[in-house]
Every structure is written in structure tokens, then in C-alpha cells.
Image (cartoon, helix red, strand yellow):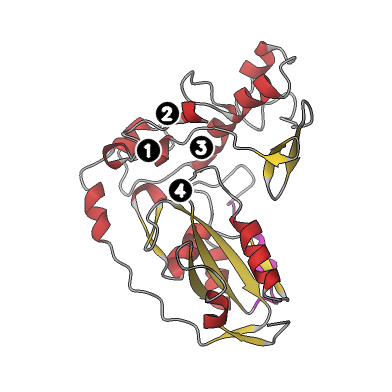
């Protein structure tokens, strides 16, 4: 398959191993709906955080890829998808940055769970989502699977994730609950809880330990830091595709994942295994 004006959806789906991937479809109109859906649960200081693929006017339709990913820190799915498509000789496509949660729901690959989480029909919560846009036409697309909400019963009467959120990002007592992800962003980067890791604590310990502790303590948000968290010392570097590298090898950086614990039904027994990182 090489630079085709049309391609069957089944031909694309066959490229991705069924035990690791679930593949869905979006029309051009559906992709635009996803693009106009704000990523954040709250408008940021510069306005609503809409995604930039509203400008990709040449994209005819897209595929949504849900990748099995039990590792919460593994974000290599785009690189994997890129390699799979290139090996097949497919051209005239591009990765799309959009509201991935909305894309998974719109394509029928999952449903919204409580507090904006997405439950994949195939892999549950252990998954990541990406979107690939094609300039050619994808023919014979699938009929979106009928969404099931039976698992919602597990969330009935349970507010553990809301109560346990260390930064109060899941707004308390408001129905429907909504997620202030700007608080999440700042906390994952600059949190100070002695039990829960943050990017700045990792950065200070491993990359720039010479920075005064007082300076680190004053880092509370992107708008208040005196210096950037540059990954440029002690063998560390930053790759925009693979993330943080140590001596050229991608490494995980632990940070707050309390919302993934889902305390009463967690495989980790309500305690995220930060100390295993």
C-alpha cells in the first residue's frame, strides 16, 4: 500500500495486532467536533484550550488508535504507530493532536467513566489513545460499536478518587463532577507532597541539584517559576517524541497519578506504586 487516494479501513486495521490495539474511525466532521471540544475541564488564562487540528483542512478522515498500555508512564504509542504505517508503505498521513478522549468516545472505542476518565471497550483503563489523519479517503469504515455503560455500576456511590485527589482538581460536591486539569498540570510538575513525586523534585534531585532549595520550593506553577526545568545536565536530555532521555535512553519520570488509583477497585490496593519507579 503506497500513497493511495483511497484505502479500505480493514487494510489499516489489519496492520495493528489485535491483542495490543483497537482501531476506530472518524469522519472529517467528527474530527472537527473533537477539535472544538476543549481538552481542559476549565478555560486557561489564555482562553479555552482548544486543539490545533481545526487547521488541518486537508484531512479527509482519521483513524483512532487505542493501545493497550498497563504502564502509566509509557507514551511510545505514536512512535509505534508511525513505524507500523511506514513499514506498510503508507504515505500522505499525519499524527493529529486533538481531544483524544473525545475521539475515543466519538469513534465508539470507549465510553466516559466518572470524572472524565475514558474506559476502553477492549482494554479498560489500561490504555493510551492517539489519532492519525489521512488525506486520502478511508473506504468501508466500520459501524461504531454500541457503547456499554454496565461498568458504571462500579462507580455508583463511590467518590474515593474525588476525595483522595491531593490538589482538589475534581470539584467537590458538584454534579456532574468536572476536572480542573490546570490544577493537575501544576501539581504534576510542581507538587510538594512528601509522598507523591513531582517533575520538579525529580529535576532537582537528578539534573540540577545545585539549585537552591528555596528556589525549588517557590516553584508552584508555570507562571511563577524563576527558571525553566531544563533537562540538560548529568546525561539527561529532552526528546519531544520519546520524552526525557538518560544517556540517550528513554526513562520514566514519576509524578502524581492518584486519580488512576481508583481506590476501591484498584489492582494496586489504593496505593499507587511510586516507590517501584
Q: Residue at x 41, y 33 (%)?
A: 272
Q: Position of residue 220 (x, y in %)?
A: 60, 25
Categorize mark 1 by other alpha carbons within 10 Å: few (<14), some (14-19), many (20+). Answer: some
Q: Is residue 51 shown to the viewer in this render?
A: no
Q: Position of residue 130 (x, y in %)?
A: 56, 60
The residue to which callout 3 is attached is 184
Q: Looking at the image, do the residues carrying marks 1 and 2 touch, with CB atoms under 8 Å apart?
A: no
Identify which residue, 253 or 118, lies in the foreground: 253
Highlighted range, magenta: 49-59
- Rounded to the nearest angstrom, the CA distance separating label 2 from label 3 is 9 Å
Q: Earlier in the sequence, mark 2 or mark 3?
A: 2
**Quadrant of the rendered image containing residue 182:** top right
The residue to which callout 1 is attached is 261
Q: Earlier in the sequence, mark 2 or mark 4?
A: 4
Q: Looking at the image, do the residues carrying marks 2 and 4 touch, with CB atoms under 8 Å apart?
A: no
Q: Secondary structure at mark 1?
A: loop
- Rounded to the nearest angstrom, the CA distance separating label 1 from label 2 is 12 Å
Identify which residue, 195 or 212, lies in the foreground: 195
Which of the labelled discs sits on residue 166, or is there none? 2
- Rounded to the nearest angstrom, the CA distance separating label 3 from label 4 is 21 Å
- Rounded to the nearest angstrom, the CA distance separating label 3 from label 1 is 15 Å
Q: Secondary structure at mark 4?
A: loop
214 relative to 149, above or below = above
Amino acid at each position: 500500500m503506497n500513497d493511495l487516494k483511497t484505502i479500505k479501513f480493514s487494510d489499516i486495521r489489519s496492520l495493528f495486532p489485535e491483542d495490543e490495539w483497537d482501531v476506530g474511525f472518524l469522519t472529517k466532521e467528527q474530527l472537527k467536533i473533537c477539535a472544538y471540544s476543549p481538552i481542559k475541564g476549565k478555560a486557561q488564562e489564555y482562553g479555552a484550550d482548544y486543539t490545533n487540528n481545526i487547521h488541518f483542512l486537508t484531512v479527509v478522515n482519521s483513524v483512532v488508535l487505542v493501545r493497550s498500555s498497563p504502564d502509566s508512564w509509557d507514551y511510545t504509542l505514536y512512535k509505534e504507530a508511525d513505524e507500523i504505517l511506514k513499514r506498510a508503505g503508507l504515505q500522505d498521513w499525519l499524527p493529529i493532536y486533538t481531544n483524544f478522549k473525545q475521539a475515543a468516545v466519538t469513534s465508539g472505542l470507549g465510553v466516559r467513566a466518572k470524572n472524565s476518565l475514558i474506559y476502553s471497550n477492549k482494554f479498560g483503563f489500561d490504555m493510551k489513545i492517539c489519532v492519525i489523519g489521512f488525506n486520502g479517503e478511508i473506504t468501508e469504515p466500520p459501524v461504531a460499536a454500541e457503547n456499554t455503560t454496565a461498568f458504571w455500576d462500579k462507580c455508583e456511590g463511590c467518590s474515593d478518587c474525588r476525595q483522595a485527589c491531593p490538589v482538589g482538581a475534581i470539584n467537590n460536591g458538584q454534579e456532574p463532577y468536572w476536572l480542573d486539569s490546570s490544577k493537575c498540570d501544576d501539581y504534576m510538575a510542581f507538587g510538594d507532597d512528601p509522598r507523591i513525586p513531582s517533575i520538579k523534585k525529580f529535576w532537582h534531585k537528578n539534573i540540577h541539584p545545585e539549585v537552591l532549595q528555596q528556589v525549588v520550593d517557590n516553584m508552584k506553577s508555570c507562571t511563577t517559576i524563576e527558571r525553566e526545568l531544563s533537562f540538560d545536565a548529568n546525561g539527561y536530555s529532552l526528546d519531544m517524541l520519546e520524552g526525557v532521555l538518560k544517556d540517550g535512553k528513554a526513562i520514566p519520570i514519576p509524578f502524581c497519578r492518584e486519580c488512576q488509583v481508583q481506590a476501591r477497585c484498584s489492582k494496586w490496593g489504593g496505593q499507587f506504586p511510586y516507590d517501584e519507579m
